[in-house]
Image (spheres, rainbow, N blue to C red):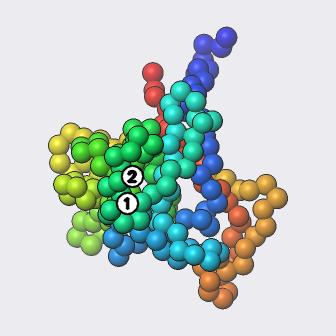
Amino acid sequence: MNPFRAWRRAENDWFSVGPTSSFPDLDDTTTALSSPRPCTGLPDPTPGCKAFHVPKEDTSKRREVPIAEDEADATASDTGADNDLTDQVLVFRYRGKFHAIDHQCPHASFPLSRGAPFDIEDFGIVLSAGLTCPKHGWSFDLFSGRSDRGNYRLKVWEVELRDVSGGQALKGVEGGEGKEEEMVREVWVRRKPRMG
């Protein structure tokens, strides 16, 4: 046993949540993350985010969780035992950057898939990005997890983009002519490891 090597914890395993092309690029004109949007390369509109149930004991038992599209479906599904928000991660792309956070609001245990992303600005200069929980209007920084009120902190997961082995380059991914080629990539996430 090497005393300088950290112990491997099962809850810190990386896992793939899909290709980058399966996530629409959101901006601050969107209302809720879960609202369907057109996505490059897909025929039907897709939700702006994906949610996964990831047990802490064994991340290999992860599964994608359906996100309700309207208020009636959301209320019915949020109360079901199958949609316990405790071990769920919410993954989305906002202004070209991928974010992975706990699906549950740390203040009110409300699904953040119904929240709205926004830019955190100071005198017109964008400093960071945030997400507003619609239940009480609390906001959280997507990079640090800090809340705008109280001492609540949203758990932020690590995100990594990996090239797909044998992947082909796509020409003009955004639909415009003259765009440079972009490699096919996958989004991988994991819980931030505990230090110490």
Residue at image mark 1: 73
Determine whether 139 is above or below 39 in the image. Answer: above
Q: Nearer the viewer, residue 191 or 5?
A: 191
Q: Which is more toward the observer, 126 or 71?
A: 71
Residue 107 percent location from the top left of the image: 24, 43
Q: Is residue 64 left or right of residue 113?
A: right
CA separation in Å, label 1 and label 2? 6 Å
Q: Residue drawn at (41%, 65%), measured in percent from left and top?
A: 69
The answer to whether residue 186 is left or right of residue 132 is: right
Q: Is residue 62 left or right of residue 185?
A: left
Q: Using the rendered view, name the quadrant where residue 174 is placed.
A: bottom right
Q: Check disc 2 and report the residue beneath it.
A: 77
The location of residue 65, given as percent across then percent down, is 50, 50
Q: State the image coordinates of residue 16 (x, y, percent, origin top left).
A: 63, 48
Residue extending farthest bottom: 177
Residue that appears at 27% across and 66% down: 121
Residue appearing at x 62%, y 86% in the figure:
176
Q: Is residue 67 above or below residue 191?
A: below
Q: Residue furthest right?
A: 166
Q: Residue at x 41, y 72 (%)?
A: 27
* SS class, disc 1: helix
State if disc 2 and disc 1 touch (CB < 8 Å).
yes
Say what amino acid the circle numbered 2 marks: Ser
Question: Measured along the vertical axis of the image, is residue 58 above or below residue 184?
Answer: above
The amino acid type found where label 1 is placed reads Asp
| Residue 160 is at least partly visible in this image | no
Question: Dot 2, how many residues are within 10 Å of its Cα: few (below 14), some (14-19), or many (20+)?
Answer: some
Looking at this view, is 132 or 119 the one in front? 132
Q: Quadrant of the N terminus?
A: top right
Residue 188 x %, y %: 60, 49
